[in-house]
Image (cartoon, rainbow, N blue to C red):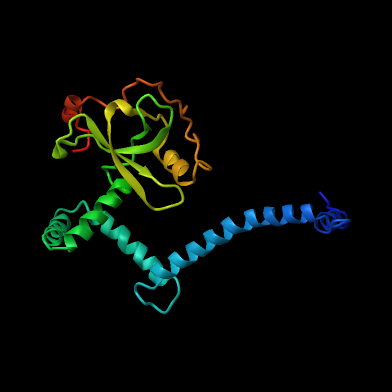
């Protein structure tokens, strides 16, 4: 299969160099180029910064070696996590950290945050719709992080975390169970939907994404949640 390179170059020239300059077309092309280049450039920059940051931990003069060794050590630690002696040593270290003032606050906060997203006891896996005003039509999307609030003396309330769009922050509200409806969608899609301000996120996993009508109980009753092994304690 042969290509007529002259025709290809001519078509590219016609696309790149317009016959007449139009201000609106110039602005439109500039914005389209900006929308295409900025996400790619920012992504490459972030990856480059993270790579250099991790690569510099071991202060090895050869670029890339520190990054590979760091990744290798993390994989090795993860593999040793099931070893009895290693778990015992980590348990002893954890006791020291949790008994030290201030260090306990930092350690437990970071550990709970990481486990909420990546651990076996994920907390952001129950997306729900919360009616802000009983009888009203405005609703907010959040994640149930704790079903049992006996420590606060609240039996018919749950803790719902509302992430903020374009921000690494959120708000925690205590709401009645009757004002909550489950969202039958993937948790990662819901988080993406919220953080992006509704621009991104979808049902790529094949789920219908249909939400039950008002009146559908999203969570078990307080008595049932106490019996459920999957409820948050």
Residue depicted at 45% across the width and 25% down the height? 210
Q: In x, y percent, where is residue 13?
A: 84, 58
Q: Is residue 140 left or right of residue 201?
A: left
Q: In x, y percent, where is residue 70?
A: 35, 66
**What is the quadrant of residue 86 in the picture?**
bottom left
Residue depicted at 25% across the width and 34% down the height? 158
- Which quarter of the rendered picture does the C terminus lie within? top left
The relative height of residue 68 versus residue 142 in the rendered view (above or below) is below
Seen from the viewer's position, the closer of residues 58 and 225 is 225
Residue depicted at 65% across the width and 57% down the height? 34
Q: Is residue 46 left or right of residue 110?
A: right
The relative height of residue 194 versus residue 61 in the rendered view (above or below) is above
**What is the quadrant of residue 127 in the picture?**
top left
Q: How many marks?
A: 0
Q: In x, y percent, where is residue 143?
A: 34, 38
Query: Farthest bottom residue?
Result: 61
Q: Is residue 97 left or right of residue 195?
A: left
Residue depicted at 42% across the width and 42% down the height? 191
Seen from the viewer's position, the closer of residues 45 and 79 is 45
Q: In x, y percent, where is residue 39?
A: 57, 56
């Amino acid at each position: 299969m042969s290509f007529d390179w002259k025709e290809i170059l001519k078509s590219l020239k016609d696309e790149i160099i317009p016959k007449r300059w139009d201000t609106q077309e110039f602005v439109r092309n500039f914005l389209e180029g900006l929308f295409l280049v900025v996400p790619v450039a920012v992504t490459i920059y972030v990856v480059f910064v993270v790579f250099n940051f991790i690569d510099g931990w071991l202060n090895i003069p050869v670029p890339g070696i520190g990054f590979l060794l760091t990744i290798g050590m993390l994989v090795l630690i993860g593999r040793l996590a099931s070893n009895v002696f290693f778990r015992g040593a980590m348990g002893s270290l954890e006791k020291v950290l949790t008994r030290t003032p201030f260090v306990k606050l930092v350690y437990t906060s970071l550990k709970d945050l990481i486990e909420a997203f990546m651990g076996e006891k994920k907390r952001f896996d129950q997306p729900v719709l919360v009616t802000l005003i009983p009888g009203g039509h405005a609703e907010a999307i959040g994640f149930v992080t704790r079903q049992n609030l006996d420590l606060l003396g609240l039996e018919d309330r749950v803790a719902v975390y509302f992430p903020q769009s374009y921000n690494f922050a959120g708000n925690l509200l205590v709401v009645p169970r009757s004002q909550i409806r489950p969202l039958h969608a993937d948790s990662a899609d819901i988080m993406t939907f919220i953080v992006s301000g509704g621009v991104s996120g979808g049902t790529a996993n094949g789920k219908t994404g249909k939400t039950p009508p008002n009146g559908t109980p999203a969570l078990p009753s307080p008595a049932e949640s106490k019996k459920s092994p999957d409820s948050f304690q």
